[in-house]
């Protein structure tokens, strides 16, 4: 049986509406959509393993975003500054 996460997510109606809006946007960056979906599913009480299976993500990634949201709320879902040269994507 999977271990229950100590980071229980409780969302207000306003917070849930904001995350649902992000999760449904077709023009939003994929990373933002996935992060919003992770938090929404965590708020429904799903385990990290089940969320990972549903969204095709490693359990460790789900755990990371759940924990960051727990401590920092919406601010935790943003990218943090990284050292080194910025990533450049060439299509």
Image: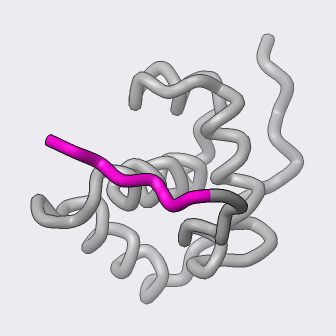
Front-most of residues 53 and 65: 65
Judged left or right of residue 12, residue 33 is left
- Residue drawn at (40%, 31%), measured in percent from left and top? 55
Query: In what quadrant of the picture does the C terminus appear?
Result: top left
Q: Position of residue 90 (x, y in %)?
A: 21, 45
Give, as a single range, the part of the protein colored magenta.
85-91
Q: Residue furthest front?
A: 85
- Residue 26 picture location, percent across and down: 11, 59
User: Would you place residue 55 above or below residue 6 in this image?
Assistant: above
- Quadrant in the picture for residue 82: bottom right
**20 versus 65 height, above or below:** below
Given residues 27 and 24, the one toward you in this image is: 27
Chosen colour scheme: one colour
Name, please, the residue furthest toward the top: 1
Residue at 22% x, 65% y is 28
Does 70 appear in magenta?
Answer: no
Residue at horizontal 29%, vertical 51%?
30
Q: Residue furthest bottom?
A: 14
Q: Quadrant of the N terminus?
A: top right
**Magenta: main secondary structure:** loop
Q: Is residue 46 left or right of residue 8?
A: left
Give residue 11's quadrant in the image: bottom right
The total of numbered circles placed on residues is 0
Q: Position of residue 15 (x, y in %)?
A: 48, 81
Residue 76 image point, x, y percent: 65, 71
Q: Nearer the viewer, residue 66 or 42?
A: 66
- Viewer-side residue, 35 vs 40: 35
């Amino acid at each position: 049986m999977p271990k229950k996460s100590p980071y229980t997510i409780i969302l207000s109606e306003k917070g849930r509406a904001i995350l649902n809006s992000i999760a449904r946007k077709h023009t939003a960056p994929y990373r933002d959509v996935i992060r919003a979906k992770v938090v929404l599913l965590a708020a429904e009480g799903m385990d990290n393993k089940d969320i990972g299976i549903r969204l095709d993500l490693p359990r460790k990634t789900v755990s990371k975003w759940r924990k960051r949201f727990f401590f920092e709320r919406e601010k935790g879902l943003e990218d943090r500054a990284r050292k080194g040269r910025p990533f450049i994507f060439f299509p």
